[in-house]
Structure formats: structure tokens, C-alpha cells
């Protein structure tokens, strides 16, 4: 019998706070309805201080991403590799199949946020997944006039916790995303599902989290949890993933511009 693991009350509170803090921290694009002050500065990369190997040859840098392998139930899991040296954004850039996603992150001013956040997991749609969207929808999302909607859609692909496939396998339930909307994670089948998308490669390690490659673009408006189609069991995630002192977000609708 499949075992479902309940998300503890403490972990639920922590995860909700983490999603709220992340959404508040991410910068609001210039010219949008919302504004924010200050800007996060990207840290400089630390020099490689690894000691040389015997014989005078330096260690090769650790690989950024690892190819997934299929587990006993068919779930895709990551290979055992050394810790990655690049952020989740570096992983996406090095992979070669996320040009559309990277462009969208730039347009929504989320690239720097995903680079500096310390523990995140991103469900990354490939270029093929974006190409499967109707052309009119793709064009509309990338229109600067709709940048807030694009930003919300992209944050729906992010969990503010470093997740791995072993925490999802055998479980089914909703998990809070950085968009403050729950996404359904389903590890009870042959492959891990994220709403209606399938994880094709899991557990790609990054220095600040994990990348899961998915075959469809997610949409918070079609969340299986929000629609009531999800189970009430949850996926266990780290209880210490919250940002301390997270404030309640301002939900006041912006005033129309004159």
C-alpha cells in the first residue's frame, strides 16, 4: 500500500511564511502597478580555493547539473554527484533548453531573486513546453503590459525550500509556492507530477537549491489544489525553510493611475 506522509503543522506554517517572504522580497518590475524600494545586489562569485591534487593538477570544478535516473517505481531521481557550484539560474543557462524561461525571468525581474535566494526549488518548463502554449497566449504573457501576470505565473513554479524527489515519492498533496498559491505534487505514480505536468528530470543540484525539469508550463489559475481536485495529504518539506519574521503581504488593490 502506498504510504502518504502528512505535512506537519509546524512545517506548514514555515512553508507558508517562506512563500510569503519570497514573494515580498522579489522586486516588482518598473512601471507595474506595484512598486518597491531598494534592490538586491548580486554577490560576486567566490574564487576557487580548492587545494591542488597530488602531482600539481587542480581539482576539476564540480558539475552544475546531474542527469536523472529512473527509480524502482519509475520516478525520475538525480544521480549521485558532487555539490553543484552554480545557482539554479546557472543550471538553467548551462542546460541549453530554457531560453524562453530565462527570458521570461529577466522580463519579470526575477533572475536576481532566484540567484540570491538561499534555498529554493524550481519546476522548470523547457522551451518545448513554452512552444506548446498557443502562440497568442505566449505573446500575451511576454507583453510588458502583462508583466505582473507573468511574474505570478513564474513564481508558481518556485517552492521556497530545497526539495528532493525522495520527499515527493509516495506522497500526494498541495505545497505552497512563492506565488502564495498551492501546487499539487503527486509522487504516487510511475512519474512525479506537478499539477498536470510531468517531471522528466529531477534532483538537478544547484548551490542554492534544486531544479526539476517539467514538460508543461504551470498556471496558478488551473491549480489542482485550488480547483478542489487535490488530496488533503501533504508533501513533507523542511520545517526550517521559512524566513524569520515574515510579514503579512499587502493585499490592497492598487489605485488606478490618472
Image (cartoon, helix red, strand yellow):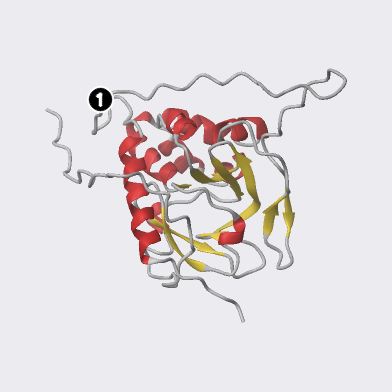
Q: Position of residue 42 (x, y in %)?
A: 45, 22
Residue 96 in sight: no
Q: Residue at the location (59% across, 30% down)? A: 90
Position of the N terminus by quadrant: bottom right
Asked if 169 appears above or below 136 in the picture, the reply is: below
Q: Residues within 10 Å of mark 1 (few under 14, many from 20)?
A: few
| Residue 130: quarter of image | top right
Q: Position of residue 173 (x, y in %)?
A: 46, 67
Residue farthest along the bottom direction in this orientation:
1
Q: Nearer the viewer, residue 77 or 189?
A: 77
Q: Which residue is mark 1?
A: 37
258 relative to 100 in the view: left or right: left
| Residue 61: quarter of image | top right
Position of the C terminus by quadrant: top left
What is the secondary structure assignment of the residue under circle 1?
A: loop
**How many numbered tags mark residues here?**
1
Q: Position of residue 37 (x, y in %)?
A: 25, 25
8 relative to 60 in the view: left or right: left
Q: Nearer the viewer, residue 208 or 51?
A: 51
Residue farthest along the right direction in this orientation:
55
Q: Nearer the viewer, residue 176 or 130?
A: 176
| Residue 58: quarter of image | top right
Asked if 188 appears above or below 163 in the picture, the reply is: below
7 relative to 3 in the view: left or right: left
Q: Nearer the viewer, residue 185 or 216?
A: 185
Q: Position of residue 78 (x, y in %)?
A: 69, 50
Residue 117 in sight: yes
Amino acid at each position: 500500500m502506498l504510504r502518504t506522509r502528512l505535512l506537519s503543522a509546524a512545517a506548514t506554517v514555515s512553508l507558508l511564511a517562506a512563500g510569503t517572504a519570497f514573494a515580498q522580497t522579489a522586486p516588482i518590475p518598473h512601471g507595474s502597478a506595484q512598486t518597491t524600494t531598494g534592490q538586491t545586489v548580486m554577490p560576486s562569485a567566490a574564487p576557487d580555493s580548492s587545494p591542488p591534487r597530488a602531482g600539481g593538477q587542480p581539482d576539476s570544478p564540480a558539475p552544475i547539473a546531474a542527469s536523472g535516473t529512473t527509480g524502482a517505481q519509475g520516478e525520475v531521481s538525480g544521480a549521485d554527484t558532487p555539490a553543484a557550484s552554480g545557482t539554479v539560474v546557472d543550471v538553467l543557462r548551462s542546460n541549453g533548453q530554457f531560453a524562453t524561461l530565462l527570458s521570461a525571468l529577466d522580463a519579470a525581474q526575477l533572475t536576481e531573486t532566484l540567484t540570491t535566494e538561499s534555498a529554493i526549488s524550481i519546476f522548470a518548463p523547457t522551451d518545448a513546453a513554452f512552444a506548446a502554449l498557443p502562440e497568442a497566449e505566449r505573446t500575451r504573457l511576454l507583453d510588458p503590459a502583462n508583466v505582473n501576470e507573468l511574474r505570478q505565473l513564474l513564481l508558481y513554479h518556485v517552492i521556497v525550500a530545497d526539495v528532493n524527489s525522495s520527499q515527493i515519492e509516495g506522497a500526494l498533496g498541495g505545497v505552497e509556492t512563492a506565488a502564495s498559491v498551492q501546487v499539487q505534487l503527486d509522487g504516487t505514480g510511475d512519474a512525479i507530477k506537478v499539477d498536470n505536468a510531468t517531471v522528466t528530470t529531477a534532483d538537478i543540484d544547484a548551490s542554492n537549491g534544486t531544479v526539476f525539469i517539467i514538460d508543461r508550463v504551470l498556471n496558478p489559475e488551473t491549480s489542482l489544489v485550488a480547483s478542489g481536485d487535490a488530496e488533503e495529504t501533504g508533501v513533507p518539506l523542511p520545517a526550517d525553510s521559512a524566513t524569520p519574521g515574515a510579514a503579512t503581504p499587502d493585499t490592497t488593490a492598487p489605485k488606478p493611475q490618472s
